[in-house]
Amino acid sequence: MGLVRIDKYCPKCGSLLDEDGKCTRCGMMTYEAKRMKGVKLTKRMKVLIPIVFLMAAFATIFALTKLMHGSYFESMNFADMERRYLLNVPQSYDSTMLVPLVIVLHGLSGTPRGIEAYTGFTAKSEAEGFIVTYPEGYGNSWNVQFGLGAAFTDNIDDVGFIRALIDSLQEKFAIDGNRVYVAGHSNGAMLAYRLAAELSDRIAAVAPVAGTIGGRAAFNSYLITIQEPTQPVSIIAFHGLRDNAVPYNGSQIYLSVDESVSFWVEHDECSEGPLIEVSEETIKKIYGGGVDGTEVVLYAFINGGHEWPSSATDEAWEFFESHPKKG
């Protein structure tokens, strides 16, 4: 029978130790075995800890990516007020590629979710790969310097808010500064006209639906119109000939559609047109040859009322695509 080393025996009961240094009888583990096990565990932890941190980093990136894409509300502080906006970032968004930004403005008493559903711009955003945002008006209204709404009554700085919103989104996302566009309905269309004038350095084109460039706060008050833009801005306007809320031919409150269009034809210095195209549903007028390739287009809907036409979103986006800011 061969000799057996003493370190193979349990110091407590004298029984044999297994290969890990643990007694086969009483289960006691020797000090040396415990020390070696700690060394092995430490080495294993040195390998596992970086893996755990790496997994956590990937999980964080995945979570942020999930938050970045899709439709959700965000808020920002402007002029000591919290201002909300609905945002849709398409699934195709890649932060290494510049994308257009479309701002869609609801009408009086409207909401971001309401105008999103009404216009279908989120579906268009996903299909075409642009970011779209639907700001929320103060008291569900916009300050266009005339007409109705809490924003006008309380003299809310909506032009400043939209400028700050553009700045904020450009900090967060890869937005092309030459492809910032605005669309709006009714009260939102009037703000779109105002933004085109006062933010002409930031906005490439606008699509007002059922709006006007000017009006009065009351029947006997003085006329207010948008200011003269410092840069050309392309316009595609949509208006129903049977609109009773903001009449096509104007009223004691609102300027007419023709006056609104003529303002932009003059300031964009359009030298061509109008080219007139007539169909069963629309009368389309195109004024081309504007400064830096700008155009002014009007769709008059023969039987249209105070509504967002079903074709307006597609037509507006096609127009936006072909009219980035130049110069």
Image (cartoon, rainbow, N blue to C red):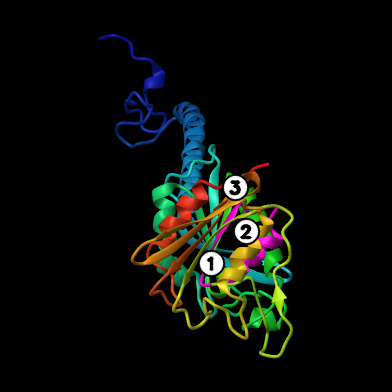
**Quadrant location of the N terminus?**
top left
**Quadrant location of the C terminus?**
top right
Choose mark 1 or mark 3, whichever is in front: 3
Residue 203: x percent and y percent?
A: 63, 54
Between 310 and 158, the one lying in front of the other is 310
Task: Judge the density around disc 3: few (<14), some (14-19), many (≥20) Cα neighbours within 10 Å.
Answer: some
Dot 3 corresponds to which residue? 289
Residue 162 seen from this side:
no
Residue at left offset 44%, top offset 53%: 125
Dot 2 corresponds to which residue? 265
Q: Secondary structure at mark 1?
A: strand
Dot 1 corresponds to which residue? 184
Residue at left offset 69%, top offset 58%: 199
Between 59 and 195, the one lying in front of the other is 195
Q: Secondary structure at mark 2?
A: helix
Residue at left offset 45%, top offset 61%: 284
Q: Is residue 155 left or right of residue 242?
A: right
Above or below: residue 15 compared with residue 98: above
Indicate yes or no whether the magenta region holds residue 196.
Answer: yes
Marks 1 and 3 sit apart, C-alpha to C-alpha, by 25 Å
The answer to whether marks 2 and 1 mark residues whose Cβ atoms lie closer than 8 Å is no
| Among the two numbered marks 1 and 3 on one chain, the one whose residue lies closer to the N terminus | 1
Between 271 and 174, the one lying in front of the other is 271
Identify the image quadrant of residue 71.
bottom left
The magenta region covers 190-210
Residue 246 seen from this side:
yes
Choose mark 2 or mark 1, whichever is in front: 2
| Among the two numbered marks 2 and 1 on one chain, the one whose residue lies closer to the N terminus | 1
**Amino acid type indicated by mark 1:** Gly
| Among the two numbered marks 3 and 2 on one chain, the one whose residue lies closer to the N terminus | 2
**Amino acid type indicated by mark 3:** Gly
